[in-house]
Image (tube, rainbow, N blue to C red):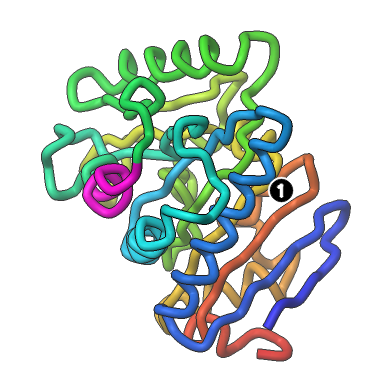
């Protein structure tokens, strides 16, 4: 099921699936199709990946479909939307998860995979990643990713933008270190400024524990503005939500 809702100047496309497996397969097909479209006429597909179990299932589905989709993996640039400040081999690393689920299975050139590194000094790591973005996209304005994949927390956070956290105010920064008080840990995240400069953003959400916050975000409008995810409104006007039946149980028409 696919709904299109106009929220202000943003088209919100809601892609509904019966279960997590179908969601992962549908999202994988979407990402691969977007990549092929971005590569038309010799272009490069620039994508920012998310951590979390729902994206992991999507990456595994993408790996299974890696051949014969029309996507040229040699013209893909891979970035991350956020990262935990842990070494790349740590089980909590978003990079490690994406590496095992997808990147080790497809022929993306190593020089086109741009890991977020903040296991040392988080501020230095954030500025280094911003320098990488400026080198890859240009320095004049925030990078315009072809697609950014995001998850959703039960508290309404996305990427590593948590409620009331300092990183919600970027002050022109593209990449920010963010100390998450309730977790007692540092993270690195793309800023809202960068998320909203993307050509398309896709949230991947599953499970009944996400139903309440998803209902607030998609059905209750202004009442959801305290959630960081509500502030993701890409200026290109294309926002997608991939949800399963459990997450979408409370939505109008759900």
Residue at 71% x, 77% y is 2
Q: Residue furthest front?
A: 68
Instruction: Pinpoint residue 177: horizontal percent, then vertical percent.
Output: 37, 28
Q: Is residue 164 left or right of residue 225?
A: left
Position of the N terminus by quadrant: bottom right
Dominant secondary-structure state across the stretch colored magenta: helix
Q: What residue lies at 78% left-to-right and 40% top-to-bottom?
A: 235
* Total count of labels: 1
In percent of the image, x 43 and y 67: which residue is there? 154
The one nearer the camera, 231 or 249, is 249
Q: Position of residue 21 (x, y in %)?
A: 40, 79
Q: What residue span does the magenta drawing correspond to?
A: 97-106
Quadrant including the C terminus: bottom right
Q: Position of residue 158 (x, y in %)?
A: 48, 52
Q: Residues within 10 Å of mark 1 (few under 14, many from 20)?
A: many
Q: Is residue 56 above or below residue 250?
A: above
Relative to 182, residue 121 above or below = above
Q: To which residue does mark 1 refer? A: 233
Rendered view: 20 above or below 7: below
């Amino acid at each position: 099921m696919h709904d299109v809702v106009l929220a202000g100047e943003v088209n919100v496309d809601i892609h509904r699936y019966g279960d997590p497996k179908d969601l992962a397969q549908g999202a994988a097909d979407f990402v691969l199709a977007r990549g092929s479209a971005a590569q038309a006429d010799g272009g490069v597909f620039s994508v920012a990946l998310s951590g979390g179990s729902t994206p992991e299932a999507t990456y595994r589905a993408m790996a299974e479909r890696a051949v014969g989709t029309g996507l040229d993996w040699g013209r893909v640039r891979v970035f991350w939307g956020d990262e935990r400040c842990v070494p790349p081999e740590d089980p909590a690393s978003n990079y490690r998860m994406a590496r095992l689920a997808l990147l080790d299975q497809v022929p993306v050139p190593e020089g086109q995979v741009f890991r977020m590194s903040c296991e040392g000094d988080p501020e230095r790591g954030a500025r280094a990643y911003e320098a990488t973005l400026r080198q890859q996209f240009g320095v004049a304005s925030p990078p315009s990713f072809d697609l950014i994949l995001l998850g959703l927390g039960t508290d309404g956070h996305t990427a590593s933008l948590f409620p009331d956290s300092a990183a919600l105010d970027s002050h022109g920064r593209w990449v920010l270190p963010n100390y998450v008080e309730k977790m007692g840990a540092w993270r690195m995240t793309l800023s809202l400024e960068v998320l909203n400069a993307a050509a398309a953003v896709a949230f991947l959400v599953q499970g009944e524990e996400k139903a309440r916050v998803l209902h607030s975000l998609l059905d209750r409008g202004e009442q959801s503005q305290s959630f960081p995810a509500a502030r993701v409104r890409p200026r290109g006007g294309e926002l997608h939500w991939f949800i399963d039946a459990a997450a979408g149980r409370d939505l109008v028409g759900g």
